[in-house]
Amino acid sequence: MSKRRLRMRQIKEILRLRYQLNRTQREIANASGIARSTVKDYLSRAKAAGIQWPLPDEMSNEQLNGLLFPVVDRKQNDRKQTLPHWPTIHKELKRKSVTLQVLWEEYKRGHPNGYQYSWFALLYRRWAKSQDVWMPQVHKAGEKAFVDYSGLRVPIWSADTRDVLYQAEIFVSVLGASDLIFCYATQTQKIVDWIQAHQQLVIYYQGVPELIVPDNLKAAVNKPNRYEPTCQVTYEEWAQHNGCAIMPARAYRPRDKAKAEKGVQLVQQRVLAPMRNQRFTSLEQLNAQLMILLEQLNNRHSKVYGCSRWALFNSVERDALKPLPQVPYELALWQQQRVNGGYHLCIQQHHYSVPHRYVHKKVDVRVTAKCIEVFYQDERITCHQRDDTPGAYTTHETHRPEAHRQQTLWHAKQLLSWADNIGPATQQLIQQLFGEPKRHLYQKERSALGILRLSRAYSESQLEQACQKAIAIGTCRYDSIVSILKRHRTLVPSSSTEQPYQTPEHSNVRGAQYYH
């Protein structure tokens, strides 16, 4: 390992003591607290470089350093020609399960005379350190809140504290200007819990920041992008309702949300660690304990700010936050479906109708606790009151095609009313039809509809006479009535109560006696 070079101030002091005061190497070493061998080495380098004292005024420290430590012009060898491409190495290291050892082995297979692993690793770390340049961030009051989930989870136990039911996630938020921290336990990292944690966040701060800076987790971001990421629809809707915006951090750039990273570390150390031996049987119990320790953390005196986080928040950031909306946000989940051929959508095993012209088209569905809204190309096409009855249908009659609407009109009551308007024989026949015990109601309705529609092909009077004939012969089937109508057998024999035909008396009528 090479020796650390002396500072330029020390080198100049050695030269002054030697050439101006004519001191020995031992005296210089004792006066400056530097080893005698080091003093000897620097004086030898100065003599070899022809350096005189006093130094010229125009000589800079860099020029003096170049004279004392000249760059050796070595011949180009194979090793320099096989220097790895460090940006590619750096990029490959971001992949899962890829290590520097694996990349070095691949490098050696391609360049047998290349660097050994220790020198390969040292050169890479030097290069990576030279690339690690970051810009300090200045956060305005009320501008940003950084959010993330803690890597540590807390188990939720059963009532008898024997079995772990699930591992609770810890949501963490930090305000940019005051560093005020908030944490909240949720069952999962799904969108419902994600939105609930944000609701508790703005309630705790009693205000809304201008920007929320999350990580690129699935509950927040659908499509990560450095410039225009696509956020989850429900998350965007929550932000619009609260009057703020979502600005996800860049992927693989933890310094974009350095506040959140530091907040997570403090929550793990000051909140989660002290209760590591406690067992919680519910999220409510866990959140109550989290709030106690969180208040202790935010009221803790900070040496950096000279006050607590709560004190800094009250003096700097509280008034800068936007007020909370008057109406709390109602959770709405969005999903995309294709309308089936029956012009219905299935939401949690219940079927809701849409206008039939949107059959086989993709629509967006907004599901809330009270209603189901359907959108096509950002235009709302229908809305239903939510009904969680499994397997049932909620249908608007206006959504049906005309033929389907007509079909649904003809039930037993409507068909009997139609028969009554045609005539008593028709009504009697339809009543006999519905009285048949062996046929299903749907079969009876279809037969009755077919019989009554014969009044359009013929006439109501002809149908009435046909029904009289059918009753007389003891049938109420559709095909029998059609046969009667086609063969015009609609005359009914006269009853005994009817008067016989009387021949009128007239001079031109001879009468029956004329023929005897």
Image: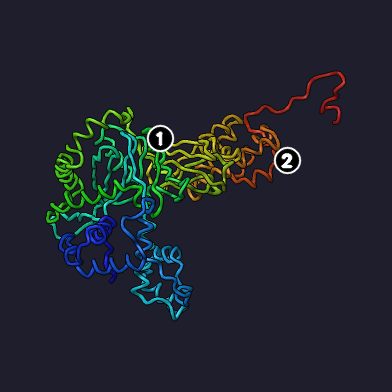
Residue wearing tag 2? 488
Q: Is residue 454 visible?
A: yes
- Direction from residue 249 to residue 438 in the image, left or right: right
- Picture colour scheme: rainbow
Q: Is mark 2 in CB contact (under 8 Å) with mark 1?
A: no
Judge from the rendering whether residue 64 lies leftward or rightward of residue 263; answer left or right.
right
Mark 2 nearby-residue class (10 Å; few <14, some 14–19, many ≥20): few
Which residue appears at 25% of the width and 40% of the height? 179
Query: For mark 1, what is the residue?
Result: 240
Q: Residue furthest right?
A: 508
Residue 339 drawn at (x, y percent): 53, 47
Given the image, on which type of amino acid does mark 1 rest? Gln
Residue at the (32%, 51%) spot, across then down = 189
- Can residue 431 be spotted in the picture? no
* Residue nearer the viewer, 317 or 79: 79
Which mark identifies residue 492? Answer: none
- Residue 264 falls left or right of residue 440: left
Q: Report x, y in % for residue 212.
A: 35, 41
Task: Give the position of the C terminus as an image quadrant.
Answer: top right
x, y (%) of residue 369? 36, 39
Indicate whether 334 appears above or below 21.
above
Q: Amino acid at mark 2?
A: His
Image quadrant holding the N terminus, namely bottom left
